Image (spheres, grey):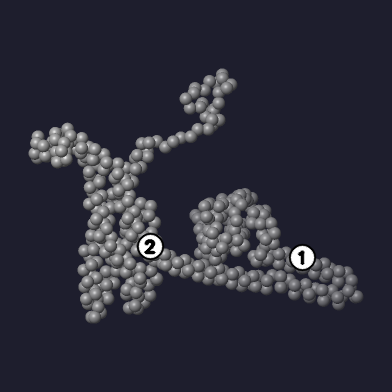
């Protein structure tokens, strides 16, 4: 039992209560807020200094290259020089994005189409509009950064310098004469000069965080206008969607081929045997009723075994329990059929039908693989909603050695998950334990 703040808990006092019984709020420490403000201001100043020197380098290098390249285009060499110019400006743009990202300004990176063979691929930047926008950014940001740099240095130095003017001004030449700023404004005397400089220093110091942040925001706005390449992100998303859909189609085709093979090798053979037994029983029912009854019993057993196999195979297509009772009940049923004691803990996660099927089949294959190969004594299945992602975790205490490589039981699961924009990772060192983690974006699954 803990005593409330500011009160000593008396063990003999029945009225004593714990701190948890009395709600209290804590306000952030002023020193912490001041320290955060100083840290952010120093970061902004560091960015402005770095931006100035980077833009200076870019201007000195890229402008001459652009001029030389433009002038030599008739002799083909200019195309190579212009490509070099755009490559350098693109590298500077990437670095500028990273600097702004460290301050909380996220700007989309340019994603160029993949390289191909041939001369055209080498000069592909020349036909890419974003490359020219990055070059334009080099020109504009040089002008802006050159303007921002002296302003930032003035505010960064004038604040502390003004407050400490009384200490360092004694070493200035001409001390003892009325020649300071206060004298020029009509206030003679050293005391007036020190007071005026300290007041100005306080103004610079108080306004420095806002000035620094404003200068950074100005450069961030220019960068957003010229460097924020949303079209490249759309191209990447389209490429990823095409890849995931192709992977889903390949996984489904593989599943259908496996199902066809399993039907041919299992239930189909039993049904053929069933027909043969029934035909033989019909021929002997008049001459040998006992033998005919034995054949009918065998045929009945064959039909039950075929039915069991068909039910097992149908779980790989669309398990009825999944559509009728939901994902939680379906995974619980899988765990109950597993030969290993399995603990199931599932959140109420809203997933589309394809995403639910993917989660179900990943769980089913993982439990099957565990039962066959791991010799595990216990297994744990968890499904959690972490932000905008559904995370499926399957852990066992077996001997390990599971792999996503071809030829292993888990090989096709990664392709199935890619069809719903999911991922699959496996950690299974020799000796165990095995951790299988599948993730599916909730927004993708809901679309």
Left or right: residue 43 versus residue 280 is left
**The quarter of the displayed image where residue 95 is located:** bottom left
Instruction: Name the one closer to the observer, 358 or 143.
Output: 143
User: Residue 36 at what x, y percent from top left?
Assistant: 35, 42
What residue occupies the far top of the structure in this picture? 12
Residue 335 in view in this figure? no
Instruction: Name the one closer to the observer, 260 or 127.
Output: 127
User: Residue 193 at what x, y percent from top left?
Assistant: 17, 36
Seen in the picture, residue 227 relative to 128 is either above or below; the reply is above
- On residue 228, which mark appears? 2
Residue 322 in view in this figure? yes
Q: Which residue is drawn at 86% across and 69% down?
A: 293
SS class of the residue under badge 2? loop
What residue occupies the far bottom of the structure in this picture? 74
Residue underneath mark 1 = 304
Point out the image quarter for the N terminus.
Answer: top right
User: Residue 98 at what x, y percent from top left?
Assistant: 34, 57
């Amino acid at each position: 039992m803990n005593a409330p703040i500011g009160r000593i808990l008396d063990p003999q006092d029945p009225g004593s209560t714990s701190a948890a019984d009395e709600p209290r709020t804590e306000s952030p420490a002023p020193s912490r807020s001041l320290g955060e403000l100083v840290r952010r201001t120093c970061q902004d100043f560091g960015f402005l200094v770095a931006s100035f020197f980077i833009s200076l380098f870019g201007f000195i290098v890229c402008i001459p290259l652009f001029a030389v390249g433009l002038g030599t285009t008739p002799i083909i060499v200019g195309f190579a020089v212009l490509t070099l110019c755009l490559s350098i400006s693109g590298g500077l743009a990437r670095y500028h994005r990273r600097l702004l990202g460290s301050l909380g300004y996220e700007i989309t990176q340019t994603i160029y189409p993949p390289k191909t063979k041939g001369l055209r691929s080498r000069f592909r930047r020349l036909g890419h509009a974003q490359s020219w926008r990055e070059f334009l950014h080099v020109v504009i940001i040089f002008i802006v950064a050159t303007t921002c740099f002296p302003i930032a240095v003035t505010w960064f130095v004038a604040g502390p310098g003004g407050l400490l003017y009384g200490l360092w001004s004694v070493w200035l030449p001409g001390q003892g004469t009325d020649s300071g700023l206060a004298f020029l404004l009509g206030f003679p005397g050293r005391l007036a000069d020190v007071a005026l400089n300290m007041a100005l220093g306080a103004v610079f110091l108080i306004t420095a965080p806002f000035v620094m942040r404003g200068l950074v925001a100005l450069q961030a706005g220019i960068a957003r206008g010229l460097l924020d390449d949303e079209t490249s992100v759309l191209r990447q998303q389209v490429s990823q969607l095409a890849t995931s859909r192709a992977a889903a189609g390949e996984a489904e085709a593989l599943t259908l081929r496996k199902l066809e093979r399993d039907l041919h090798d299992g239930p189909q053979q039993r049904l053929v045997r069933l027909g043969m037994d029934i035909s033989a029983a019909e021929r002997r029912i008049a001459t040998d009723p006992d033998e005919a009854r034995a054949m009918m019993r065998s045929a009945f057993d064959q039909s039950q075994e075929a039915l069991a196999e068909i039910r097992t195979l149908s779980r790989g297509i669309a398990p009825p329990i999944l559509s009728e009772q939901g994902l939680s009940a379906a995974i619980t049923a899988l765990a109950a059929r597993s030969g290993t004691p399995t603990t199931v803990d599932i959140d109420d996660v809203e997933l589309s039908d394809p995403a639910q099927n993917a989660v179900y089949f990943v769980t089913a294959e993982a439990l099957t693989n565990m039962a066959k190969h791991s010799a595990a004594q216990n297994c744990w299945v968890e499904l959690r909603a972490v932000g905008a992602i559904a995370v499926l975790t399957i852990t066992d205490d077996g001997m390990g050695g599971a792999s996503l490589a071809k030829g292993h039981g888990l090989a096709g699961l990664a392709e199935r998950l890619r069809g719903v924009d999911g991922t699959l990772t496996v950690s299974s060192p020799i000796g165990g334990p095995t951790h299988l983690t599948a993730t599916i974006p909730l927004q993708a699954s809901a679309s």
